Amino acid sequence: QPFTEVGYNVEVPSEQPGLGLTTDYLKGSGGTYRLSWNNAVSYKGLSGGFTFGHLFGQLSNNRRVEFDSIPDAYIAEFLDKLSLRGFYWRFGLQYTHDFKKTDAQGERKPAGKRLIIGAHGNSASEFNTRSSRFAERYNFRYQRQDTILDGSIIEQRGGLPSALAVGVIYEKM
């Protein structure tokens, strides 16, 4: 299932002091996804569930700058790519207690009230990233192209925080 999505294509003209009109073209694509396995069990009033998953994806961001007011100016273009991979897990527990009362025959019957206590959480999850940066400038009129930056693959680590939540509800049915 998609976890995050990137999708934009924006053109931003602006007036720059000393340069005149410039236009930024911003484009982004890609996304991250989660593939998960889920399981749950229930016994009497206690239920529990567990999720184990894999987080993966690739994001791409491109920025092109054109100097519209300068004849024969070079166009600068920057491309950033990021891919990531990691594992995560989550859990949840819920207990339901149905209150009972004894009727005239001495049998225990539902009293129409219950208490539900639940908790869910997830671990702090680490993921690995691989990123690259590329920048070039070019001029169509003179058929010239120049690489400004050809960044090698950079491997890093990131993390998602852990979480824990608890809830209690009393209800009359």
Image (spheres, rainbow, N blue to C red):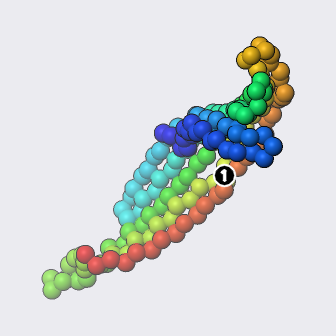
Q: Position of residue 19 (x, y in %)?
A: 78, 40
Q: Residue lying farthest top?
A: 143
Q: Is residue 89 above or below residue 96?
A: above
- Looking at the image, which residue is at 70% across and 33% down? 68
Q: Which sits in the foreground, 87 or 78? A: 78
- Please identify the quarter of the rendering in which residue 28 is found: top right
Tell me if 155 is positioned left or right of 60 in this view. right
Q: Quadrant of residue 154?
A: top right
Asked whether 105 or 97 is in front, the reply is: 97
Pick whichever, 36 or 100, lies toward us.
36
Quick check: 118 left or right of 131? Answer: left
Residue located at (39% from left, 58% from top): 43
Q: Nearer the viewer, residue 130 or 65?
A: 65
The kind of secondary structure element at disc 1 is: strand
Residue 159 percent location from the top left of the image: 70, 49
Q: Position of residue 82 (x, y in %)?
A: 69, 35
Judging by the rendered image, the residue that carries numbered circle 1 is 160
Point out the residue furthest to the bottom here.
104
**Percent coordinates x, y for residue 158 in the rendering:** 73, 46
**Residue neighbourhood size for the residue with mark 1, other residues' Cα within 10 Å, grouped as few (<14), some (14–19), many (≥20):** few
Residue 167's place in the image compared with 134, above or below, is below
Q: How many marks?
A: 1
Q: Can residue 140 be seen from the camera position used here?
A: yes
Amino acid type of the residue that numbered disc 1 sits on in the rendered structure = Leu
Residue at the spot 44% in from the left edge and 64% down from the top edge: 94
Image height of 166 relative to 153, above or below: below
Q: Is residue 130 among the parts visible in the rendering?
A: no
Q: Quadrant of the C terminus?
A: bottom left
- The image quadrant of residue 8 is top right
